[in-house]
Amino acid sequence: MTPENANRRIIKFLRDLADDRSVQITQNRHPLVSATYGGQKRTFGLACSPSSNYQRTIRCRLNRFVRSLEIEQKPPFNF
């Protein structure tokens, strides 16, 4: 899986978790995905130049981010 496809799956996963099912994507140096989760606005950063271990590292970072959210169901992310 390419990093672009991985980022698309991550964005879709975050969109499904968001309160209003919408996210804002901004890019200054790194792509940032912002949304409201459990009434709180939170931002998750993606890598713009991923390394060879991108899937493993981003999966760990994303699952840590999801565990920190104030939501009832906290599904783990897998590729």
Image: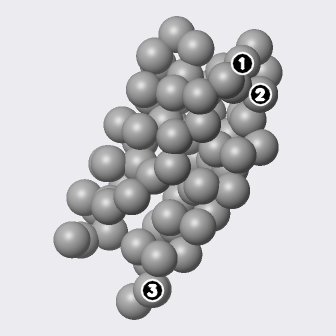
Label ID, residue 38: 1
Q: Secondary structure at mark 1?
A: loop
Q: Secondary structure at mark 3?
A: loop
Q: Say if mark 1 contacts mark 2, CB within 8 Å.
A: yes
Nearest the camera: 31 or 3?
A: 3
Q: Residue 8: where, in percent of width, then height?
A: 31, 48
Q: Which residue is mark 2?
A: 70
Image quadrant in which you'd find residue 61: bottom right
Crowdedness of circle 1 by 10 Å Cα count: few (<14), some, many (20+)?
Answer: some
Q: Amino acid at mark 3?
A: Asn
| In-image side of 12 versus 1 (left or right) | right
Colour scheme of the rendered structure: one colour
Q: Residue at the spot x=77%, y=43% of the render?
A: 68
Q: Say if mark 3 contacts mark 2, CB within 8 Å.
A: no
Label ID, residue 53: 3
Using the rendered image of the protein, determine whether residue 74 is visible from the camera's viewpoint. Answer: yes
| In-image side of 14 versus 70 (left or right) | left
Q: Residue 25: where, in percent of width, then height?
A: 50, 36
Nearest the camera: 14 or 29?
A: 14
Outermost residue to the left: 1
Outermost residue to the bottom: 52
Mark 1, mark 3: which one is toward the viewer? 1
Q: Secondary structure at mark 2?
A: loop
Q: Residue at the spot x=39%, y=89% of the render?
A: 52
Q: Residue 50: where, in percent of width, then height?
A: 45, 77
Nearest the camera: 45 or 14?
A: 14
Using the rendered image of the protein, determine whether residue 41 is visible from the camera's viewpoint. Answer: no
Outermost residue to the top: 20
Q: Residue at the spot x=47%, y=19% of the render?
A: 22
